[in-house]
């Protein structure tokens, strides 16, 4: 089933923000590359070729482009601020994991690390997945994710995606 253009753009925006956020966190925690001014070269005991990258193109497994995409695909949850069509700032919440509660008005998702988010569901919420066309088709125990806009203490789901 094809998502509407608006939902597809929202998911793309979330993916882009996840890449930027994940790469920033990874870079902040990663040691500086050897040869950086004022930084000693990392210790490489037991390696015959310490400066040889694991992948072609000069990138290694942990910090390369492939690593960033892998980390994005493995993202569990996130929160970021974007501008809506009117230029107003809105907070967007995303979560991926196991559906622990589902009803006609809400869905709760628990990420692998224990983070839990409850999304309010309304008539504008897109619900998609294999054999899933409406919130009534979503079952506890399904794997999936949701993206929603936070207003106060309420997160209103824009999209709920279910994988069985």
Image (cartoon, rainbow, N blue to C red):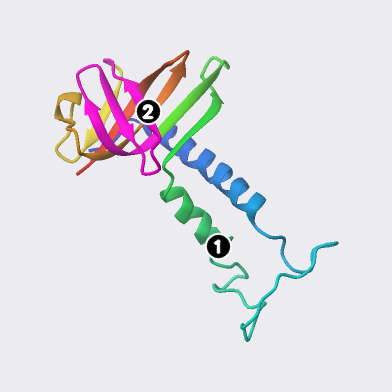
Quarter of image, res 117: top left
What residue is at 45 percent from the left and 19 percent from the top? 150
The residue sitting at the bottom extreme is: 48
From mark 2 to mark 1, how far is it between C-alphas?
A: 29 Å
Foreground: 164 or 110?
A: 110
What residue is at 23 percent from the left and 27 percent from the top? 101
Residue 151 drawn above or below residue 139: above
Tell whether position 110 is magenta: yes
Q: Is mark 2 on a helix, strand or loop?
A: strand
**Disc 1 crowd, CA 10 A, few/some/many (<14, 14-19, 20+):** some
User: Would you say the magenta stretch is mainly helix, strand or loop?
Assistant: strand
> Residue 117, which numbered label?
2
What percent of the width, then of the height, locates residue 23? 58, 49
Residue 71 drawn above or below residue 95: below
Query: Quarter of the image containing the N terminus?
Result: top left
Q: Is mark 1 on a helix, strand or loop?
A: loop
Residue 71 drawn above or below residue 92: below
Label tally: 2
Residue 26 drawn above or below residue 12: below
What percent of the width, then of the height, locates residue 2? 27, 37
Tell whether position 13 is magenta: no
Q: Say which label, 2 or 1, has the lower sequence index.
A: 1
Q: Give the range drawn in magenta.
A: 95-123
Contact between labelled residues 1 and 2, with CB atoms less than 8 Å apart:
no
What percent of the width, then of the height, locates residue 115? 40, 35
Q: Give the residue number, with chain letter if any, for mark 1.
A: 62
């Amino acid at each position: 089933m094809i998502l509407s253009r608006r939902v597809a753009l929202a998911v793309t925006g979330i993916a882009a923000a996840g890449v930027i956020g994940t790469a920033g966190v990874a870079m902040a925690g990663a040691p500086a590359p050897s040869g950086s001014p004022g930084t000693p070269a990392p210790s490489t005991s037991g390696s015959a070729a310490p400066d040889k990258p694991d992948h072609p193109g000069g990138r290694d497994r942990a910090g390369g482009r492939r690593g960033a995409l892998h980390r994005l695909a493995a993202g569990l949850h996130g929160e970021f601020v974007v501008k809506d069509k009117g230029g107003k700032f809105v907070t967007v919440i995303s979560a991926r994991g196991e559906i622990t509660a589902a009803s006609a008005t809400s869905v709760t998702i628990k990420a692998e690390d224990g983070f839990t988010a409850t999304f309010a569901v309304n008539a504008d919420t897109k619900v998609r997945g294999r054999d899933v066309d409406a919130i009534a088709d979503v079952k506890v125990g399904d794997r999936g994710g949701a993206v929603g806009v936070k207003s106060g203490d309420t997160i209103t789901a824009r999209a709920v995606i279910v994988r069985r």
